C-alpha cells in the first residue's frame, strides 16, 4: 500500500512537472537570432553587403543602394504575378506563421504584401515589387519617409516587430 501511494505521488509529481513546462520566449528568440545570424553570414558571402541607413535619415539613392540577390519563389500562387525583379523586403522570417501575420497587418493598411521563400527556407515579407531597382528604391524611400513624417518610425518595431532601418532591396535570381 505504501509503495502504491509512493508510485501515485511520483506519477502526479511527474505529470505536474512536465505539464507546467511551457516554451519560453527567450528560447524561441535565441533560435530566431541564430537563424538570422546564419542567414546574414550566408548572404554576406554570396552577395553584396547591405548598407543600413540611420533611423533618423531615411534617404537613399538607387545608384548606391545595395541589393541582396536570391532565388525566391512566391509562397502563394496568387502572388506569382506580383513578384518582380526587385522587391522591398521589410522582414526575413524563419517561421511561416510570423510572416503571414506581418503580411496581414500590413495588408490591413492597404499594402499588397507578397510572401516569398528562398532556397534556405527563409520567408521574405515583401511590401512592393518592381521591374527596376530605381522603382523599388523609390517605393522603399516613400514608405519609410511616410512613417518618419508621421513620427511612426520609432514605433515600427513595437507595432510590427520589425526595425525601421532593416528594410532592404532584393534582386530576384531565376
Image (spheres, rainbow, N blue to C red):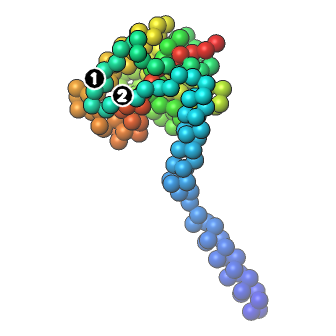
What residue is drawn where x is 36% and y is 14%? 61
Q: Quadrant of the N terminus?
A: bottom right
Q: Position of residue 25 (x, y in %)?
A: 50, 53
Which residue is at a point 49% across and 7% down the rendered structure image? 131
Q: Tell me if 138 is positioned left or right of 43 in this view.
A: left
Is residue 24 something one can see in this rendering?
yes
Q: Which residue is mark 2?
A: 53
Residue 51, compared with residue 18, is above or below; it is above
Residue that extends furthest to the bottom in the rendered view of this protein = 2
Residue at far top of view:
131
Q: Label 1, on which residue?
A: 146
**Which quarter of the figure is the C terminus placed in?**
top right
Quarter occupied by residue 116 = top right
- Placement of 172 over or under 33, stated as above or below: above
Identity of the residue drawn at 27% across and 31% down: 56
Assess disc 2: are there few (<14), some (14-19) or many (≥20) residues with their C-alpha within 10 Å of its C-alpha. Answer: some
Amino acid at each position: 500500500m505504501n509503495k502504491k501511494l509512493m508510485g501515485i505521488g511520483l506519477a502526479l509529481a511527474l505529470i505536474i512537472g512536465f505539464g507546467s513546462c511551457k516554451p519560453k520566449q527567450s528560447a524561441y528568440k535565441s533560435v530566431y537570432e541564430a537563424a538570422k545570424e546564419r542567414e546574414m553570414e550566408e548572404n554576406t558571402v554570396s552577395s553584396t553587403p547591405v548598407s543600413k541607413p540611420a533611423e533618423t535619415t531615411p534617404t537613399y539613392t538607387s545608384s548606391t543602394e545595395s541589393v541582396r540577390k536570391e532565388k525566391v519563389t512566391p509562397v502563394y500562387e496568387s502572388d506569382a504575378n506580383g513578384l518582380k525583379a526587385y522587391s522591398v523586403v521589410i522582414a526575413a522570417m524563419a517561421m511561416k506563421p510570423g510572416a503571414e501575420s506581418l503580411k496581414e497587418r500590413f495588408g490591413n493598411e492597404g499594402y499588397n504584401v507578397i510572401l516569398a521563400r528562398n532556397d534556405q527556407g527563409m520567408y521574405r515579407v515583401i511590401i512592393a515589387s518592381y521591374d527596376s531597382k530605381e522603382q523599388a528604391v523609390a517605393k522603399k524611400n516613400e514608405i519609410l519617409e511616410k512613417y518618419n513624417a508621421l513620427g511612426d518610425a520609432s514605433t515600427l518595431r513595437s507595432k510590427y516587430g520589425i526595425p525601421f532601418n532593416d528594410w532592404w532591396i532584393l534582386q530576384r535570381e531565376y
